[in-house]
Image (cartoon, rainbow, N blue to C red):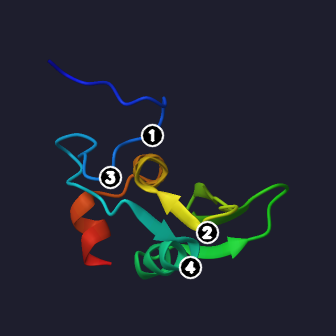
Amino acid sequence: MATTWPLRGTLPPDVCLDDALACMPKSLSRRELIRKFRALGWTGPHAGKRHQFMQRGTKKIRIPNPHGSGDIGAGLIAEILRQAGISQQDWDGA
């Protein structure tokens, strides 16, 4: 019997998101996220209205400003990568 995770939008630490994305680290610092995006050719972060963003060509992604823990969770990282069109192999190589 499958167990459901108690909070919608959160994942237990060692759960893979799907077959396309291998298991991601359970969290990542904002600084490390920006470093990896720069290594993949993104510019920024640039000032936005509420969140800073990074840009590559015509694509823009918002950079979250984590409050409290200072880390960005695996679910949010996976969503940002999906929106940016970054494959797991590219992400791991950055």
Rendering coords of residue 86 (x, y %)? 36, 58
Residue 13's disc number: 3
Which residue corresponds to the image point at 32% horizontal and 52% vertical from the top-left? Answer: 13
- Of the numbered discs 2 and 1, the one sitting upstream in the chain is 1
Rendering coords of residue 20 (x, y %)? 20, 45
Rendering coords of residue 80 (x, y %)? 48, 52
Task: Characterize the local packing of mark 2: few (<14), some (14-19) or many (20 or more) Cα atoms within 10 angstroms.
Answer: few
The vertical placement of 66 against 17, above or below, is: below
Residue picked out by circle 2: 70
Rendering coords of residue 42 (x, y %)? 52, 73
Looking at the image, is mark 4 or mark 1 nearer the viewer? 1
The reply to whether residue 52 is visible in this rendering is yes
Q: Secondary structure at mark 4?
A: helix
Q: Secondary structure at mark 2?
A: loop
Horizontally, is 46 left or right of 77 in the view? right
Task: Characterize the local packing of mark 1: few (<14), some (14-19) or many (20 or more) Cα atoms within 10 angstroms.
Answer: few
Relative depth, front residue between 72 and 38: 72
CA distance for labels 3 and 2: 17 Å
